[in-house]
Image: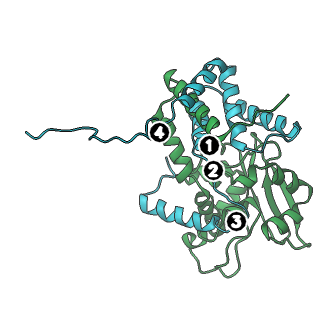
Amino acid sequence: MTVHIRTQEEIAARVKALEALMIEKGIMTTAAIDRLAEIYENEVGPQLGAAVVAKAWTDPEFKARLVANATAACAEMGIGGLQGEDMVAVENTDTVHNVITCTLCSCYPWPVLGLPPNWYKGPEYRARIVREPRKVLREDFGFDVPDSVEVRVWDSSSEMRYWVIPVRPAGTEGLDEKALAALVTRDSMIGTGAPKAP
Amino acid sequence: MGYRQDATELGDARRRVEALVSGMPGESAPFEQPWELRAFAMAVAAYHAGQYEWSEFQLSLIDSIKRWEAGDGGEPWSYYEHWLTALETVLAGNGALSDADLDDATKAVLATPPNKGHHEAHREPVAVDPAR
């Protein structure tokens, strides 16, 4: 069987045709699609997760609730939605470093991290991070995890979506939540990077 | 929604996020082509409209990716093509979409490019509102 590789023009036309058919059948409206596109492109993003992490760093009771039930703790801050129903926040410590993936597709906690970057969805990261996590972190992300630290790789699925609470950087004792949130990067919540230094 | 912020805060947050993602290995924007964002939003819209359970869509997406992984590698990797295939599959599965209708509508779109007629010079005003 020969594989017909579609051009971008053909795919774009198919998406446009699909949208027209769905609107014609009354299944959705252009306004609804526009609004969802805007929300996910511009409004939902890792700045929301960063705010949650900063609160956890400054409020031990909140952190305990976050570790116990991430979805409920995020809801306290008005953060939640599709792909955020069963979230688990795994906490990094001096002896354990966590990193997330989805081996089957691209499950990812949208409400706190936004949409995943392309490399997270790609077949290479999904396969290699499981086989050789330390090497992938070092070679692909320039992130060295000391040998004394255990690396745990968590596989998200539609039933449970993981994300990482990074270790609070040293020298941040005087910073408030807002300043701390600015240090929390998307990759530090995926586990492929560290938070920024103050 | 609880996470909506005022325009200034949102702008600040976006600039901060853009600063964070620049310098990442490879490019990091979630969408490379406009159709990808459109297909993404349509799948969420159809879910909100009660067309399917989100888990059905996810299983369909996993299926499409698995078939690609089991293939001979002739097709280049495109995450959102799998997304589109999954969306078409679940909509066809519940009777909301016929493949033949979609094929016909796609051909019609391809036959009417958005810039049709743009290679011709238009030498007269396209509209005139006469003096009164």
What chain letter is assigned to the residue under label 4?
A: B
Answer left or right for A136 relative to A60. Answer: right
Q: Which residue is drawn at 59% across and 68% down?
A: B19
- The reply to whether the C-beta atoms of the residues labelled 2 and 4 are less than 8 Å apart is no
Q: What residue is disc 3 on?
A: B24
Vertical comparison of B37 with A174: above or below? above
- Please state which of residues A24 and A172 is positioned toward the viewer in this rendering: A24
Between marks 3 and 4 in the image, the one whose residue lies nearer the viewer: 4
- The reply to whether the C-beta atoms of the residues labelled 1 and 2 are less than 8 Å apart is yes
Q: Which mark is residue B36?
A: 1
Quadrant of res A31: top left
Quarter the N terminus of chain A occupies? top right
Q: Colour of chain A?
A: green
Report the Cα–Cα distance between label 4 and label 1: 21 Å
* Sequence-earlier tag: 2 or 3: 3
- The reply to whether the C-beta atoms of the residues labelled 2 and 3 are less than 8 Å apart is no
- Please state which of residues B25 and B17 is positioned toward the viewer in this rendering: B25
Mark 1: give few (<14), some (14-19) or many (20+) Cα within 10 Å: many
The disc labelled 2 sits on which kind of residue? Answer: Glu
* Sequence-earlier tag: 2 or 4: 2
Q: Is mark 4 on a helix, strand or loop?
A: loop
